[in-house]
Amino acid sequence: MKDFRIAALTCFCAIAMSCNENSTEKAAPADADTAQVVTATADPAELKKEVQDLETRWAAADNAGDVNALAAFYADDAVSLATDQPMIVGNDAIKKDLEATMAKKPKGQKVNYEVMDVFGSGNYVTEVGKTIRTDSTGKVTSTGKYMAVWEKRNGKWICIRDMGNNDAKAK
């Protein structure tokens, strides 16, 4: 009888864990069409390519000054850890911060995001990358690094956490 209870408990736990894995997808914000529909793959090189495509589209929105497109990459419950300020919690607060950042952005500045590494499985991928900002003439004005955690919700990758900062200026 004791063995039966242990077996039953084990089966229950396995079923509960399976159901939990399948219920992790949450509703994406209505304007999340910017986030590309991709499927997590076991091939790290393919996953890195998929995340780089997201970052390439992110850079296009950033370079165009399209705050709405940038905000659409973030989940409603996202948290951004920006340099020299408190945590920015939620899509609305992140969008407000993006608007302030865009207002201060030098005219003609462009940014490029290069994915250096990705790791994760299932519905979560963590990305590590670097940024290169250039002025209107193409001269590099700053470099930096970032990390982003992406979650697949309703078949789309959506950013749930990010942080980044600039490298020290060369002396």
Image (spheres, grey):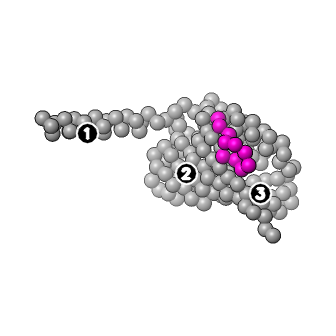
Residue lying furthest bottom: 171
> Relative to 7, does residue 126 appear above or below in the rendering?
below
* Label 2: how many Cα within 10 Å (few below 14, some 14–19, many 20+): some
Q: Secondary structure at mark 3?
A: strand
What residue is shown with label 1?
10
Residue at (78% x, 64% y) in the render: 169
* Label 3: how many Cα within 10 Å (few below 14, some 14–19, many 20+): some
Image coordinates for residue 91, horizontal then vertical, percent? 66, 35
Magenta residues, as a range? 81-90
Q: CA distance from mark 2 to mark 1?
A: 31 Å
What's the mark number on residue 133? 3
Question: In the rendered image, is residue 148 in sight?
Answer: yes
- For badge 2, the amino acid type reads Thr
Give the mark, 3 or 1, whose residue is nearer the N terminus: 1
- For badge 3, the amino acid type reads Arg
Q: Secondary structure at mark 1?
A: helix
Residue 97 lies within the magenta run: no
Give the mark, 2 or 1, whose residue is nearer the N terminus: 1
Query: Looking at this view, is 124 or 137 the one in front?
Result: 124
Residue at (34% x, 35% y) in the render: 16
Foreground mark, 3 or 1, reads 1
Question: To which quarter of the image does residue 117 belong?
Answer: bottom right
Query: Looking at this view, is 30 or 92 the one in front?
Result: 92
